[in-house]
Amino acid sequence: MVRLLNIYTISAFVALAGVIYGFDVSSMSGVLGTEEYKDFYGNPLGTRQGAITSAIAAGSLVGALSASFLGDWLSRKVAIQLGTVLWCIGAGLQASSNSVGMLIAGRIVSGLCIGITSTLVPIYQSEIAPRKIRGRVVSLLHFAIAWGILVQYLVEYGCSFLNSQAVFRLPWAIQSVPAIMLFSGLFWLPRSPRWLASKDRWEEVLHVLAFLRTPNSDINDPLVLAEYKEIEEQIRIEREMDLSSYRELFSKKMRRRLFLGMAVQGLSQLTGINVILYFIVYVLQSAGISNTLLVSSILYIMFIVATIPTILWTDSWGRRSSLLVGSLTIAFWLYVMGGVLARYGEPTQAQNLPYTWTIVGHPAARHTVQASAYLASAAFAMSWGPIEWVYPPEIMPMRIRTKAVSLSTATNWTTSFTVSLVVPLLYRKIAWRLFIIYGSLNVASFFFVLFFVPETKQRTLEEMDEIFEHGEPIWRSFRGIRYTGRLDQLAREIEQGKFVHRSVHVELCDNVEPNGHANLVE
């Protein structure tokens, strides 16, 4: 357990990137209903407000695409630091904006950071984590996102009592705090061992693995040497193939993995969660609920709590099961929201509201919509929320991982941009029908996962080829493919002195110490 402390500590710290992402999610929802925001920016509605909200997704799309190059060139760690610098610049532009145009520009710059970090942080976490806790470790990113959403929302709620432009400027300026912390702390964290291996920095690979896997950084530990060998073998095979990473990315062999990564990220944004998280104030107002700022905070608290079971048990119950159950649960609650709004709602008379359909009276109906929004967001937090970050990095081979995850994350942000842009307009045009559409999309996602998404729990990153090239058909086994234990077998061979290293960089001595640890000579 002691040796896992390094993994959890490092992964939790880099998950500060998730706090930044969470700040972005609620950076608008907490100020949309304030008079100061409406007065200063001319009460933006429909497409105009959609453009402001979606600007950060547009920047994130560019950032995600650039992450493939930056992550391989600068390393995951340094590229994440670059992203935090961009975030601080964007936060400054937003906090000092004097027009809608400047606000949008600031959100685009901030989006560059979100695109870079949301691509590279899950990769970094996946590459430092052992297979048995990889899902839990990467799920910390979503947990941090949930905390970021709540903290920023509470800051905005507190600032809403001010009688000045500080109502929105102060929360936007405070966004820089986690970015500064992440930038500074990364100087003391190791680089990804798999990135180091791709650069032939083998001695550093061994020492980083020892630091991550053992309590006393023992480079002779059998499990450390077994993982070292597995990484080395994977790198050697990849280089013998002598393929261009871009050519292989779109090759027939990798097409399925790339499509699955992009599909999981894209479908996560079609669950309807953006309507609830970004525009919860509009949803609650149309349900006839007052004091929406305080009531909305309950949703964000539930979002945090609902993430905890997935962090603890996703490596036991699997990615596939989480997505299947989550899709049906989210669909059910969205259908309830749409049905109740349709049955008890009526057209509004005012023309300057962000909604055109509202519930008048019927307190039970109002609270049903409220509770359904809470439960739909909780279902997302237990399923699609964490898994969308876990799944794409772990199914991609090292040689194309950053490029493939970059495209997957770009799909996320393309979908998010489109949704954020059109939802304010659609909510005014089709009202309750929007929830019926999203419910149906979740049902479609259920069948997609059922027939096309294989289970990946308990497998090392280097073993993913076996799942996609030699695994049994998905429909034969709901639980997916069992772990083969190859890494453990390598460790046992090392302890027994049967291991022969193929590398010219590091090789084992003929003798083995009494404690079972093999000596290393360079």
Image (tube, helix red, strand yellow):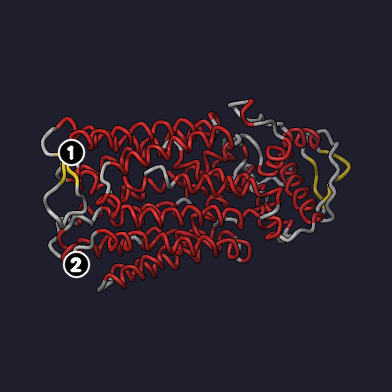
Q: Position of residue 456 (x, y in %)?
A: 61, 36
Q: Which badge, 2 or 1, comes first in the chain's sequence? A: 2
Which residue type does callout 2 highlight? Gly
Crowd tier of the residue under label 2, counting other residues whose Cα lies within 10 Å: few below 14, some 14–19, many 20 or above: few
Residue shown at 70% from the left, 53% from the top: 251
Q: Quadrant of residue 283?
A: top left
In the picture, the quarter occupied by the C terminus is bottom right
Crowd tier of the residue under label 1, counting other residues whose Cα lies within 10 Å: few below 14, some 14–19, many 20 or above: many
In the picture, the quarter occupied by the N terminus is top right
- Seen from the viewer's position, the closer of residues 423 and 175 is 423
Q: Quadrant of residue 390?
A: top right
Name the secondary structure under disc 1: strand
Residue shown at 37% from the left, 44% from the top: 273
Residue extending furthest toward the right: 510
Name the secondary structure under disc 2: loop
Say if 238 sits above or below 486 in the image.
Answer: below
Q: Which residue in the structure is indicated by mark 2?
A: 42
In the displayed structure image, the side of residue 299 where residue 328 appears, left or right: right
Q: Is residue 184 visible?
A: no
Callout in the foreground (2, 1): 1
Instruction: Kindly identify which numbered label has been placed on residue 345.
Output: 1
Marker count (numbered): 2
Q: Position of residue 238 (x, y in %)?
A: 76, 53
